[in-house]
Image: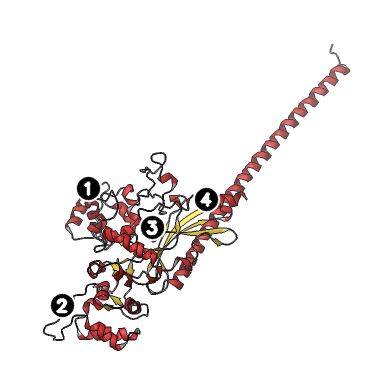
């Protein structure tokens, strides 16, 4: 016979059921709380990621703003081969929009190797004519650069890369054909300085030196020995690489700033050429009497059966031969050329008003003894740097003639190495933009993203941005 449950046992079961429900509800609540926290954390992560993307976009827009600003600066100040004065434009922490900023990472014109190395970048546009052009530089000039890893063999290989007929080119072609995978010696003009990575003997310590982020200064990780990459000599002095001194863009157009065809000073052996030059001198404001005097200093034989051999081999040689004054030279210097190219375009001339000590040291006629003197004179006389008439104050006529085939006082290609930082000091990007001013208007001929090389604005800018963010 079955017993009927007593009142006490029924009450116990009811309490147990209620306890089970409570536990289930608590677990459910716990699960819901966990889901809430999970999705909240996920949304927070997504918010941070979105904020980072916005900061990156902000930095990229700052770079775009910097590109447009650089074009505006060049349009206004880089007319007729002139180099914009750093005082005429902003180059550091230039605001774009609400809080984004950009910088032009440049190079100081007056730094001597013996001076204390800067710890923060110099901010400016970069003159490409201040460098040696890979398409015209000689092996001897490359070997004259202060690069411990530059060997005669590597210098020859650099020159051979652009040649299709030399013996060195044939040897290089044979070497490259045995590589895996095999390739050929290019045998044509360099299109980018980064082609140096393809050359036989190219090592990163020669190409980049210690300046692995390409900002022209010795950053902390570039002066700590083996503590962090790259490995360096920890001597407090920046050992720059080959990329610091070379370009592929420097070229002067066939027309002058006024739009007229340049006159070739190496062809003044005919009466027609001499008359054209004398006319141009008077058109530029030089008196007829003075123009005749200038022309009389240029050797000439009017007898067509015994033509005079041209003794002038460069524009600088023309300047010292004619003994023109600085004021006269300022009127006519953009009307002259000495190139033998059928296009009339002069490629690879180095602007002595902007070239570094290292580059000047590599130029025949200047060399390592005169280069520091030229840079010191430039620093003391900045108002004279509109042309190179000032060379007569620091160099002999013979030295100017020796250097004349390699130098100029005009620049038509400029690099804007633009680093952008987004709002609130977050987000970072960097882009190298090369402008060509040969036609009188800025034309972009090259872009390269350098963001992957890391922070390049120095420690002071980093601290400043961090301080602004914390504030």
Q: Is residue 135 above or below residue 218?
A: below
In the rendered image, residue 167, in percent from the top left (x then y), is placed at: 16, 57
Q: Is residue 314 above or below residue 368?
A: below
The residue where tag 1 is placed is 178
**Mark drawn on residue 155:** none
The residue where tag 3 is placed is 111
Displayed quadrant of residue 422: bottom right
Q: Secondary structure at mark 2?
A: loop
Q: Secondary structure at mark 3?
A: loop
What separation in Å lies between label 2 and label 4 (alpha carbons)?
61 Å
Q: Nearer the viewer, mark 2 or mark 3?
A: 3
Q: Nearer the viewer, residue 228 or 333?
A: 333
Q: Secondary structure at mark 4?
A: helix
Q: Is residue 46 left or right of residue 228?
A: right
Work out whether mark 1 precedes mark 4 in sequence or the reverse, and give the earlier one: 1
User: What is the residue that sits farthest to the top in this orientation?
Assistant: 1
Work out whether mark 2 precedes mark 3 in sequence or the reverse, and give the earlier one: 3
In the rendered image, residue 183, in percent from the top left (x then y), is placed at: 26, 52
**Mark drawn on residue 309:** 2
Tell me what residue is drawn at x 34 percent, y 81 percent.
260
**Mark drawn on residue 462:** 4
Q: Secondary structure at mark 1?
A: loop
User: What is the residue that sits farthest to the right in this orientation?
Assistant: 7
In the rendered image, residue 30, in percent from the top left (x then y), is placed at: 71, 33
What separation in Å lies between label 2 and label 3 (alpha carbons)?
42 Å
Tell me which colouring the rendered structure shows: secondary structure
Crowding at mark 1 (Cα within 10 Å: few <14, some 14-19, many 20+): few
Quadrant occupied by the N terminus = top right
Q: Nearer the viewer, mark 1 or mark 2?
A: 2
What separation in Å lies between label 1 and label 2 (alpha carbons)?
48 Å
What separation in Å lies between label 1 and label 4 (alpha carbons)?
47 Å
């Amino acid at each position: 016979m079955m017993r009927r449950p007593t009142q006490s046992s029924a009450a116990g079961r009811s309490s147990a059921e209620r306890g089970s429900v409570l536990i289930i509800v608590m677990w459910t609540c716990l699960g819901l709380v966990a889901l809430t926290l999970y999705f909240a954390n996920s949304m927070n992560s997504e918010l941070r990621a979105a904020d980072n993307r916005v900061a990156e976009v902000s930095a990229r827009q700052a770079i775009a703003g910097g590109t447009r600003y650089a074009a505006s600066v060049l349009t206004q100040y880089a007319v007729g081969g002139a180099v914009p004065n750093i005082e005429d434009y902003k180059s550091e922490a230039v605001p774009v929009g609400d809080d984004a900023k950009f910088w032009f990472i440049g190079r100081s014109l007056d730094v001597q190797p013996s001076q204390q190395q800067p710890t923060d970048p110099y901010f400016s546009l970069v003159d490409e004519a201040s460098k040696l052009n890979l398409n015209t530089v000689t092996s001897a000039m490359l070997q004259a650069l202060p690069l411990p890893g530059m060997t005669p063999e590597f210098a020859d290989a650099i020159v051979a890369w652009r040649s299709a007929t030399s013996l060195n080119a044939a040897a290089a072609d044979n070497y490259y054909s045995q590589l895996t995978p095999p390739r050929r010696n290019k045998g044509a003009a360099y299109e980018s300085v980064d082609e140096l990575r393809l050359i036989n003997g190219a090592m990163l310590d020669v190409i980049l030196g210690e300046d692995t982020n390409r900002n022209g200064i010795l950053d902390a990780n570039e002066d700590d020995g083996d503590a962090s990459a790259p490995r360096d000599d920890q001597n407090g002095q920046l050992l720059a690489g080959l990329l610091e001194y070379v370009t592929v863009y420097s070229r002067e157009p066939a027309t002058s700033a006024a739009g007229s065809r340049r006159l070739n000073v190496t062809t003044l052996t005919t009466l027609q050429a001499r008359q054209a030059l004398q006319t141009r001198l008077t058109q530029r404001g030089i008196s007829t009497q003075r123009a005749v005097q200038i022309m009389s200093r240029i050797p000439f034989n009017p007898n067509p059966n015994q033509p005079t051999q041209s003794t002038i081999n460069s524009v600088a040689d023309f300047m010292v031969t004619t003994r023109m004054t600085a004021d006269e030279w300022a009127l006519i210097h953009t009307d002259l050329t000495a190139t033998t190219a059928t296009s009339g375009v002069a490629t690879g001339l180095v602007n002595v008003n902007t070239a570094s000590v290292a580059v000047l040291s590599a130029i025949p006629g200047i060399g390592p003894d005169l280069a520091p003197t030229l840079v010191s004179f430039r620093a003391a006389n900045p108002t004279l740097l509109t042309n190179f008439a000032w060379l007569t104050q620091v160099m002999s006529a013979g030295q100017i003639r020796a250097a004349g085939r390699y130098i100029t006082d005009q620049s038509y290609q400029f690099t804007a190495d633009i680093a952008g930082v987004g709002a609130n000091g977050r987000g970072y990007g960097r882009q190298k933009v090369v402008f060509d001013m040969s036609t009188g208007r800025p034309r972009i001929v090259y872009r390269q993203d350098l963001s992957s090389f890391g922070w390049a604005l120095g420690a002071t800018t980093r601290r400043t941005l961090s301080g602004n963010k914390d504030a």
